[in-house]
Amino acid sequence: MMPRRFLPVVLAACAASLGATLVAGMPTADAARSAPARVAGGTVTATFEVSGATGGRDVTVTAEPGTGRIQVSPYYWNNSGGGRYLHVGFGTSGGNGCSVQRWVVVDTSDPADLTAAAFASDGTALPATDLPLSGSAEWDQIDVRIETAPFDAVDCVKAASHASADPADPGAAIWSHKAVPLVAVGFNDRNGIFPATVACPREVPAGGSLDIAVGYSTDPGTYPGAGIIPRPSGFDSLAFTVDPSDAFSGASVPEPATDVDLWTDEPWTGELSLQLDPSQLYFVRASGTVTIDGVPAAWGCSGRIPVTVPVPTDWVGSLAGKAWWVRGSASNSGVGDFNLHRVYQFLDDEWVYVHDEYAGPRTEPCTKVSKDMTGCHRYYYDADSDRLQIDDRLARTRDGGWGMPTYGGRYENYSTDHVIRPVTTGQRLAYSGQGRHGVALTLRRDGTYTCHYCIGAARTSSGRYRFVGGDAQELVLRQPGTDFRSGVELYYAPRDGRTRLYDIDTGLRTLRVQRW
């Protein structure tokens, strides 16, 4: 099995039987008495810019009146221009604006370690406990958390920065922001379904166990290029369901944690195990619902999970000499968009080379399997049953070809009648097609061509062409001045009952054409 990876905004979990719900046990009476009371006012938050003549900074604030917890996240505060002390007042709105009942003053003197103190509405200092964030030290530069005595519900907040820490006599405001409303927030209101987490496996063996690591994270998360994402500081219960599927059945689930305090508890992880149905040989999906304190949200493993199969020992057959192609495209800053062809080239009865951008047949032998989808891979083919396997993944049969395994459980369709043929010396072709950005190239059977802008000149070029070079064929376009030369690959496929030339690639990415 390859290493698992954590996905930032999805969760996977399961129940003992598919479609059933596993509910974390509700807290006991003793536990309920000792747990923080997340009732009065719930969790409320606001984001605004505290600014002045020399600039400004975004500030995100969160308050939980029922627990007495307050969080202030000034994103990399500029204390040289904005002042040392940031005063944040939480209160209730009325005729006189926002009537503050709880002040929090953030000391920004040490940019790597913000600290805060709490004050009553009249400026009296209040006992407060600092609740540091665990994990990355970077959070100390953008967030501070404290816990005070519970207070009444609040619905507005205002802020200003000063040279003094005393809210009763702070001095002149340096930066400021008028009062703004506080908005209630839940776990699933901001960027996914935090705090639930999942690590879906990168692959699963055929008929084996699909093991998914589920749990919760105490990482608060940040907006891209901004501050902490505000969310409640804890929850009471978790419940998980798995969507019914013929691909797997329920096997085992971990016991979810309850009465969780995300500001002080350690993160939790358990392993959820599903039994894969033996008939699933290509890929599997898993999804369901997580419910946190009665609020549901959907989870799902990201994309398809590839199914791996054992190496066959009794298959007999070879695809040596075959080369199948599909069209593709790419771009870079130098030439912009350009066409390409991805090719499966079967070197012998054991190795296949996967070209992401075909530029001629591979002549060197393969000695080890590539870690990427491109490069050398082992293949197994059984002529009697017409089965094909690349490394430890089965190819999927399709009408006239194969679905070949690619990244993340996906498949790409290759037709066995889409072939590559060599150019012969002196060959003339009747061909016309469209190149990059609609550029037209016409190659006529008599050896003449017309090319509109195809080699970068802002004019129409015309002249003659021919193929030369023995085994290493080149296309030579005769035109006034220096001849243009490039290696050539020809791609054929059936049309109207005949095998016809579809595409021409040259070594110059701006001189590639497709007929249909």
Image (spheres, rainbow, N blue to C red):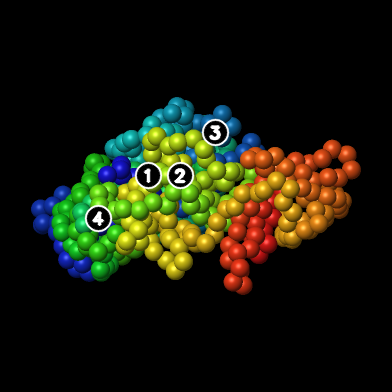
For residue 202, side relative to residue 454 (left or right): left
Q: Quadrant of the N terminus?
A: top left
Q: Which amino acid type corresponds to the residue marked 4 in the rendered image?
A: Ala
Q: At which x and y percent is residue 232?
A: 33, 53
- Which of disc 1 and disc 4 is earlier in sequence? 4
For residue 85, side relative to residue 153 (left or right): right
The image quadrant of residue 188 is bottom left
Q: Who's the residue at 58% across and 40% down the image?
A: 56
Mark 4 and mark 3: span between their CA atoms? 56 Å
Q: Who's the residue at 65% across and 60% down the image?
A: 501
- Which disc, if any, is residue 206? 4
Q: Is residue 21 visible?
A: no
Of the residues tagged 4 and 3, which is closer to the observer?
A: 4
Secondary element at tag 4: loop
- The residue lying toward the viewer, choosing from 158 and 57, is 57
Q: Which amino acid type corresponds to the residue marked 1 in the rendered image?
A: Glu
Indicate whether 356 appears above or below 23: above
- Residue matched to label 1: 350
- Which of disc 3 and disc 4 is earlier in sequence? 3
- Which of disc 2 and disc 4 is earlier in sequence? 4
